Image (cartoon, helix red, strand yellow):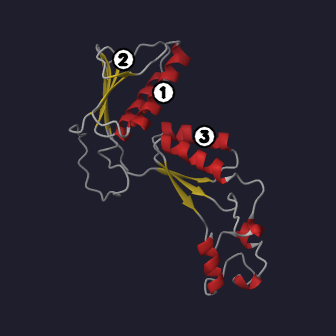
Amino acid sequence: IAFDWQDDSEIGSVKSAAMALCHQVESRFGITGRSLERSAEADIQIVLDANWRSPYEGNINEVKEFPTIQQQSYELTVGPEGVVITANNATGLCYGIVTLRMILAQIDEPYLPHLKITDWPDYQIRGMQLMSPFNMETFRRVVDVLELMKFNRIWVRCENRLRYFDNPDWINPTAPSDEELMAAFEYARTKNLDVCPEMPIFSHASWWLGRLQDKTLLEGKGPNLNFKNKRAVDIVTGV
């Protein structure tokens, strides 16, 4: 595998995807892969070309903080000279590598048909809501599947899966530590998955609202906080 580009600032995620490809080829076909820098001898060329564009001509309002649909596009070509994956952004290159991995998973011998795929997403953001993990290994396996599906966002519903040290009544002893959560979320980011925490605020929070010592903060008998109570608003702000 050879990498061809001038700017190495985003090479990390692409090399991570390429390592997964090498591992797949080695485990399935017994062929050991290695990375080369700008080598014409490589079987797989990964090319970052700032001038390349997919045929996508949509006019949807795109989120500025996210890679655009053009940046998530790629071209995958398999011919007599080998495999070439081209994109104008590291994100697109990663998706091209994922597609190659999916093709390799469907063949029994290390021979690829000649083909050309030009691909881009219909939606800029493609996500799934998950409960914040108790088991980090399970979370990583889910992330690996979402990577193959080219998802790019996870909404993580936290609820009682955090350790609220500011309020001892809310500490869940089985919840993962902050360090474990940060490591899990960083792993997701290496797979081009943005992590967005989600927290129920005034309602849908029965686990920790039921542990409030001051029941006057609740709306009626609960499990909703009374948003007219300033102390209740302060609690939400702290969370």
Residue 58: mark in rendering: none
- Can residue 77 be seen here? The reply is yes
- Measuring from the top left, give residue 69's x and y in whole percent: 32, 47
Estimate how packed mark 1 is, as few (under 14), some (14 to 19) or many (20 or more) residues with alpha carbons within 10 Å: some
Q: Earlier in the sequence, mark 3 or mark 2?
A: 2
Q: Nearer the viewer, residue 70 or 161?
A: 161
Q: Quadrant of the C terminus?
A: bottom right
What amino acid type should be assigned to the residue bearing mark 1?
Met
* Secondary element at tag 2: loop
Mark 3 residue crowding within 10 angstroms, few (<14) / some (14–19) / many (20+): some
Residue 74 point in image, percent of width and height: 32, 36
Image point 35% across, 47% down: which residue? 122
* Residue 36, horizontal then vertical, whole percent: 37, 20
Mark carried by residue 140: 3
**Residue contact between numbered discs 1 and 3, judged by CB atoms under 8 Å:** no
Q: Residue at x 38, y 50 (%)?
A: 123
Query: Residue 113 versus residue 65: which sits nearer the camera?
Result: 65
